[in-house]
Image (cartoon, rainbow, N blue to C red):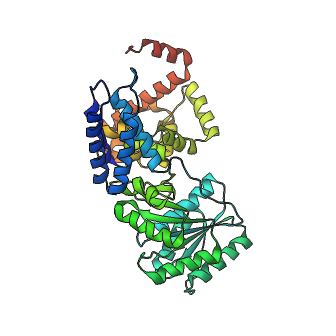
Amino acid sequence: MFDSLSDKLDRAFKVLKGQGQVTEINVAETVKEIRRALLDADVSYKVAKQFTDTVKEKALGQNVINAVSPNQLMVKITHDELAELMGGGASEINITGNPAVILIAGLQGSGKTTFSGKLALHLKTKKGKNPLLVAGDVYRPAAIDQLHVLGEQVGVEVWSDKENKSPVDIAKKAVAHAKSKGHNVVIIDTAGRLAVDDKMMTEIEEVKKAVSPQETLFVVDSMTGQDAVNTAKTFNDRLDFDGVVLTKLDGDTRGGAALSIRNIVDKPIKFIGTGEKMEALDVFHPDRMADRILGMGDVVSLVERAQEQYDEESARKLQKKIAQNKFDFNDFMSQIAQIKKMGNVKDLMGMIPGVGKAMKNMEVDDDAFKGIEAIIQSMTPHERENPKVLNGSRRKRLATGSGTSIQDVNKLIKQFDQTSKMMRMMGDKKKMAKMMQNMPKR
């Protein structure tokens, strides 16, 4: 996401590379390129101009100290203003109340039903809540079925009534059901509607009035660009929603919605959808998004995702096995499973500073581990626990059994050996210190 915008901003900053000082001329040229990049990303002209005027004013108002180049100064100012443009800081979802009611609204095809399932999983696993999903789309039976499938997938109860054609009645009965069954959060998925459809807009206003939700979230497909911002404004005028959810940010989006929606509707972006998996939902952090747009990665989010998959007891057992030089292919497979749970591989690599730009044109298959898993699954339990027994004939059998080649098997075993050595070294503080001392100095 934002690859095109990142490239154009990078080119804009190059205007200042090698410059000894900030001048009105070189800043004006850089700012012009930044504005052009924002407009190409489908940010409205008004927002782009206001943004670049602020950047220019701040750049000309600062002295460049010796340790910071004009280029670095401009990147810093642009970063801070991008974060401010997108809201400044993360905005928490309001789940107070018993039950807390969350109303989901948006256009047809924006991803409301999928988001509802993702939100239920998020609140269940990360907030310790017992959510109830409510199928409030009375016009599309497939939406009700889809919500039931998602509910089963994430282990959350779904309340529906296909015979009832009143969204208001469904919502009220669902809240009553939640109270009687001990659900402390109710997530109401509603029918997609057009902002110009007065009847449908009145209907969702009536649902909101009937259940008095703690949160009304507007779900918008970020791939619709500036149209998404205009639609958000129309919905907000009628619903006065509490926050925005941007879906499909993993797609080929220009990013205009993410950059200007806060400025137009004055409501925070609360969540972003970054993939098809139910775990692919992130709390929106404007500063981290600014980092990623400017190619700085997002190490904090990467660490948080890793911590979510971190099992203290398993980690302790693994550490003990590494110390005893007993790390085997079962452990290797377990580590792969944890990485896969963290999300899309290319998205994860994009969070590492510098890596995102380096691999922007590379295709990274989300099934990158498929061949490795096939080889390990072709091993006998004895081979997995004792990698050293994998001689030539066994490797040939593994290649045949997994549908791979001898070269693939040899490559995996080499990777495993390197991983094992690195893990042992990291566990041995003396060896690690010696390795650091022997590293070439810059």
Tell me if residue 370 comes above or below residue 113 in the rendering.
Answer: above
Locate residue 70: give its quadrant: top left
Q: Nearer the viewer, residue 132 or 400?
A: 132
Q: Which quarter of the image is occupied by the C terminus?
A: top left
Let me know if residue 70 appears in the view: yes
Tell me if residue 14 comes above or below residue 233 in the rendering.
Answer: above
The number of numbered badges drawn on the structure is 0
User: Residue 415, percent across and down?
Assistant: 39, 32
Tell me if residue 142 comes above or below residue 387 in the rendering.
Answer: below
User: Residue 260, percent across and down?
Assistant: 40, 55
Point 48% across, 67% down: residue: 112
Taking the image as shown, residue 348 lies to the left or right of residue 98, namely left
Taking the image as shown, residue 142 lies to the left or right of residue 407, namely right
User: Residue 78, percent across and down?
Assistant: 39, 40
Taking the image as shown, residue 83 lies to the left or right of residue 35, namely right
User: Residue 73, percent across and down?
Assistant: 38, 31
Q: Nearer the viewer, residue 170 or 343?
A: 170
Point 46% across, 50% down: residue: 86
Let me know if residue 14 appears in the view: no
Q: Nearer the viewer, residue 176 or 257?
A: 257
Point 69% across, 67% down: residue: 99
